[in-house]
Image: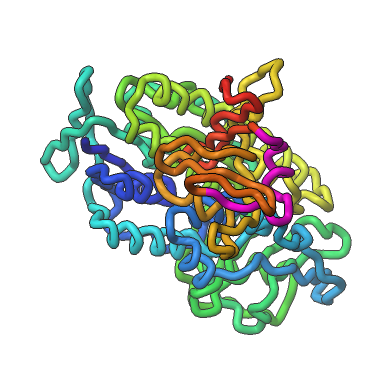
Amino acid sequence: MRVLVAGAGPTGLTLGIDLARRGIDVVIVDKAERHFAGSRGDTLQPRTLEVFEDLGVLDAVLAAGSPVPATRVHLDGVHVMDRWMAEPVAPSPGVPHPNPWCLGQAQTEAVLREHLAGLGVRVRLGAALTGLTQNEKGVTARLSTGETVRAAYLVGADGASSTVRKALGIAFPGTTDEAMRMLIADVAADDLDHAWAHWFAHASEPTHGVHLSPLPGTGRLFQFHAPLPEAVSDASLDTLQHVLDGFTRGVRLDRLTWSSIWRPNIRLAERYRVGRVFLAGDAAHAHPPTGGQGLNTGVQDAYNLGWKLADGSAALLDSYETERRATAERVLDLSTELLRRHKDGAEDAHERDETTRQLDITYRAPSPARVCAGDRAPDAPVTDRDGKDIRLFDIYRGPHATRLTFGGPAPDEPHAWAVLRPGETVPGPYVTDTGGHAHAAYDASAGTEVVIRPDGHIGRHSADRTGT
């Protein structure tokens, strides 16, 4: 089976990795002539870090990035305080990566591309999708190179102006705030300490100013954020310097490597699928940058879709839109509320809390029974048969589903494990819940069975093994 992915951003690359590790023939094309070079989405949320751990790229992401720094607040050119967008949280048995991680989008994409190449897949640049047709057996896509590609499925991960979405005739309702224009750029500021983010504003209007956040692995560049003045239409180094000089003197900008002007887009595709063609990432939902949700939501789309494409069953393919569109709608509400608070000058408009970490994503269907179907499966420390310390995430890792049976032997099938308390043994594979964290995390007693889907969400949780 072949899957064609249009778009080589974080969404398309994540999907490519998930498909390739399952042995699926995946082709990734992108209309760009060269790889994206800017920071854009530079915050990886905790749930994304868990996904990257499962896909085998977390170590490289952590090595390339850094924790999200605290911000030095300067009012009228004077340093007045330091503050966190969110106070760092200590890891817990259920959440091994509780804090966001800072890494520019270009660096994240480079890590994903390198891993994908190790799986035998390379992105084809300069190959724009120009048209498509489909029937009950597959999709035929026409490329700007003049060739056609036949695939079982096509996934449009080609951004907010998606050619795939337009070819399908899917509406993309929402709003674009033309009155709010923002500068974003990657630029050096050698006068500033690169260990901190910096906020420059006037004491009379402390929530309106310039934010410079350090970008790890870029030669001491910062990501520059600021409102674009009226009647200004370029994002040159001179414009950035002029804007910054309006709030502070003595900080010189240099080495501009990328810049853009953005307007808040808030849009959600009416459908995520037509036949054998799917939408993912910005092609399906456009977010304002508040809350750092857009890139991360696209990664979650890909992680949800990959195993369903590999399975190919009608019910699973139908569930992609049901699960992910509802999630995007909720995340858009969050991003929009944070944007409103930003525009209103709220002091906490850029602070992060539980709702931005994406650990609470659920695909749970309403049920009167005691069911935990669809929630993210938490981690927990356990030991293997030899007494070695491992984690539940270690046995979940990979493209398979996992079955846990608490207090009794696991079924004789691949990736099925018994979860026992100290002193208990059973035939077959088992782990020991030495601290009781696994039982607590899954609200489990003897006889409880939990099935973990390949995307790390609970597919079934039953105390009597009858399912739901």
Residue 165, x across and y down, in percent: 37, 29
- For the point 70% across and 43% down, the residue is 439
Question: Of all residues shown, which one is farthest toward the left?
Answer: 147
Q: Nearer the viewer, residue 181 or 151?
A: 151
Q: Nearer the viewer, residue 381 or 225?
A: 381
Residue 457, x across and y down, in percent: 55, 38
Left or right placement of residue 248 versus residue 235 in this view: right
Quadrant placement of the C terminus: top right
Residue 362 is covered by the magenta coloring: no
Question: Of all residues shown, which one is farthest toward the top?
Answer: 368
- Say if residue 233 shows up in the picture: no
Residue 145, x across and y down, in percent: 14, 45
- Say if residue 276 shows up in the picture: yes
- For the point 42% across and 35% down, the residue is 305
Residue 442 is covered by the magenta coloring: yes
Residue 465 falls in which quadrant of the image?
A: top right
- For the point 60% across and 59% down, the residue is 383
- For the point 69% across and 56% down, the residue is 434
Relative to 451, say whether 128 is above or below.
below
Boundaries of the magenta span: 430-446
Q: Nearer the viewer, residue 294 or 388?
A: 388
Q: Nearer the viewer, residue 296 or 349?
A: 296
Left or right placement of residue 191 versus residue 209 in this view: left
Quadrant placement of the N terminus: top left
Relative to 460, say whether 455 is above or below.
below
Residue 246, x across and y down, in percent: 72, 67
User: Which coloring applies here?
Assistant: rainbow
Question: Count the marks: how many?
Answer: 0
